[in-house]
Amino acid sequence: MGVKLRVSMIALAAGALAACQTATSQEPAAEPDFMEQHQGLIILDTHLDTPANLVQPGFDIMERHDAALDYSQVDWPRMEEGGLDGGWWVLYTPQGPLDERSYQLTRDVAIMRAVAVREMVAANPDEFEMADTAADARRIANEGKKVVMMSIENSYPLGTDVSLLETFYNLGVRMVGPVHFRNNQFADSGTDIQQAYGGLSPLGEELVREANRLGMVLDGSHAADDVFDDLIELSGAPIILSHSGTSAIYMHPRNIDDERLRTLAEHGGVIQINALGSYLKQFPENPERDAAMRAMRAEFSTSPADMTEEEYEVYIARRNEVDAQFPPERADFEDFMEQLLHALRVIGPEHVGIGPDWDGGGGVIGLEDVSDYPAITQRLLDEGYSWEDIGNIMGGNSLRVLEAAEAHAAELAAAATTE
């Protein structure tokens, strides 16, 4: 039985008990405890990189893993512990050459990642369910199952055929980001050396129109500032930054300035705060660790996704050795909260959410995996935010943006039928 369903049953039982009390009883009803209220929230993460783990040999989403040992941060037991109801599961592909052969190869990788997500759902129908709409997501969460929608991080595998986006929509994709670490055929990246287009390319503008037509949320994380500006101008629906930070707290190309934050909110959008350490603070150079990591990668001739289960165990053990000998510098919970609280002060709890970048490099000391969501809730309560505010931050805002994308797509479809 899922957590949300258990909470509902607890509430029903409490109501029945109250109804049986005598009219002369003066005892006040007991307030729900913290964990009961936390688990009663709909908590959705906008950037779960976990599909990369689904194709790793021996990984089982239904088993509890340990981030300190195998680096994974999301599985069903820890989702239950932390109250995470699911969200957007990422189809990530790294940037490659801008040629047709590379597009085709990467397209196939992205499609197989989507298949892996759907296989996870099919293998565990009592625990996971695909959501086609925001209404589906609410229903699934309230039934105690985990919400599965997908997102595309880096539209590179679409090649030059924007119509392929509909194929991914039919597979369950409801969010799309044009670009990743490097410029591609659609847009400039915030972390490339120089811009290629000064924003979106003409093909990128087509991508915006197609995403709007389908009812997909557009994701500006990783995009250059000029791309953000173009997305705001061209999209008829609000956009999201699925895993970003604020440059007022730490200046980094992946973070956004306060003026654009306010523009995002004015257009109904949401920023989901990242917990990837290098986007939160500056770390000192660690050349010994860098050299050890390069040497470790050189030891293995295949990528982890292509290893056997035995090879992967050796790979993880070797990585543990490097971390033990040369521990990485890490940000902590206060670094993450400084970003979150700044965004909340600038644009309010209706436009801020949580996107730590789990299984994609995110996580800080004190916020190690998805079982740690209660720490965020407690800190927000301590800062004076209401349970209603926290409900918006934890999932309500991202669902509102999806609903707006759905509504805009319906408007476009209705307009097309009258032309």
Image (tube, helix red, strand yellow):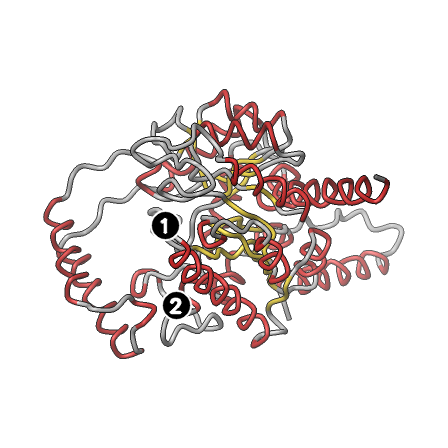
Residue identified by numbered label 1: 95
Could you tell me the amino acid type at mark 1? Gln
Give x and y (percent) for residue 406: 71, 46
Picture quadrant where residue 88 is located: bottom right
In the image, residue 323 sits, relative to residue 244, either above or below, namely below
Q: Decide: few, some or many residues near mark 1? Use Cα within 10 Å; few <14, some 14-19, many ≥20.
A: some
Q: Are marks 2 and 1 in contact (CB under 8 Å)?
A: no
The image quadrant where one finds the N terminus is bottom right
As measured in the structure, the alpha-carbon distance from the residue carrying label 2 to the one carrying label 1 is 29 Å
Name the image quarter holding residue 416. top right
| Local SS, label 1 | loop
Q: Identify the secondary structure beneath mark 2.
A: loop
Image coordinates of residue 158 in percent, x first then y, are: 50, 53
- Please name the amino acid that badge 2 sits on: His
Q: Dot 2 surroundings within 10 Å: few (below 14), some, or many (20 or more)?
A: some
From the viewer's perspective, tell me whether residue 242 is left or right of residue 209: left
The mark found on residue 65 in the picture is 2
Q: Is residue 315 above or below residue 293?
A: below
Name the foreground residue: 192 vs 21: 192
Left or right of residue 92, residue 41 in this image? right
Question: How far across and how far down the image is residue 271, in percent?
Answer: 52, 36
